[in-house]
Image (spheres, rainbow, N blue to C red):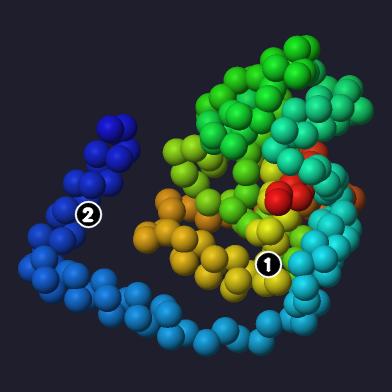
Amino acid sequence: MKQDDTSRETILRRIREQIGRSPDEDARARERVHAHLASLEPNIVPARGQGDDEHRQRVFTERAQSVQAEVQRVRSWGDIPPAVSAWLRLHNLPQKLVMAPDARLGEAGWNSQPLLRVRSGAAEDEDVNGLTIAESGVAETGTLCLASAPERPTLLAWLPENSIIALPSSRIVPAYEDALRLYSEEHESPPRSINFITGPSRTGDIGQKLELGAHGPRRLLILIIDEA
């Protein structure tokens, strides 16, 4: 267990002791919270992202490209390695990549690209190119929803100057509320962080001129995977 995890558990244990709930009372409190969240009604949701799968995927692509993200569609996870290698060559970037230790990426067949050096794990200062997987995509704004997990370290989407994010086409949802609902349905508890990313990092504060890469990745490639 990491030191920060140990400290977190210590703090939470002390909070529980101060509250003084029994295990049964704690369980009932959790049930009340889940029931409250499940009963919430969404506010006004824009109609832009509503529609069938094809419509949502088209709107997502258009909105993502409108904020300087690059979008490519691939047929399967096995098509990711050649797509990544070709994109790196297109931008004259080194054939070197750190990727999330997710089994779907690990089994994608990276041996097909012998010139591409791939490492699995968290991003480090010297890493220029990072690859991870999004939890979902929001059609209305072309936004990616990323949730922290051991197999998807958060820094992979923030630290490398060039960010590549894989997104299954089946997980493109209409609105932000749908992205949060999807995560809640598939997981018993929230992650340490959920991040919504719309395009590469940018700022207009420097001479009122748009600059990319000010607070994070300068380039963003979204690979939409058409899973069966």
Residue placed most toward the observer, 217 or 64: 64
Measured along the vertical axis of the image, is residue 44 above or below residue 200? Answer: below
In the picture, measured across the screen, residue 68 lies left or right of residue 173, that is right
Q: What is the crowding at mark 1: few (fewer than 14 residues within 10 Å), some, or many (at least 20)?
A: many
Q: What is the crowding at mark 2: few (fewer than 14 residues within 10 Å), some, or many (at least 20)?
A: few
Measured along the vertical axis of the image, is residue 138 above or below residue 100? Answer: below
Image coordinates for residue 85, horizontal then vertical, percent: 81, 25
User: Which residue type carries mark 1?
Assistant: Val
Residue placed most toward the observer, 74 or 146: 74
Image coordinates for residue 134, horizontal then vertical, percent: 63, 49
Can residue 63 be seen here? The reply is no
Q: Disc 1 vs disc 2: which is toward the camera?
A: 1
In the picture, measured across the screen, residue 33 lies left or right of residue 130, that is left
Q: What element carries label 2?
A: helix
Q: What element carries label 1?
A: strand
Residue on which the image places disc 1 = 173
Measured along the vertical axis of the image, is residue 15 above or below residue 159? Answer: below
Residue drawn at x 62%, y 44% is 133
Image coordinates for residue 73, horizontal then vertical, percent: 83, 46
Residue drawn at x 56%, y 24% is 120
| Res 102 → quadrant | top right
Residue placed most toward the observer, 225 or 192: 225
| Res 163 → quadrant | top right
User: Which residue type carries mark 2?
Assistant: Leu
In terms of sequence position, does the residue under pointer 1 or pointer 2 come before the other? 2
- The quarter of the image holding the N terminus is top left
Residue on which the image places disc 2 = 12
Residue drawn at x 77%, y 34% is 79
Checking the image for residue 77, the label placed there is none
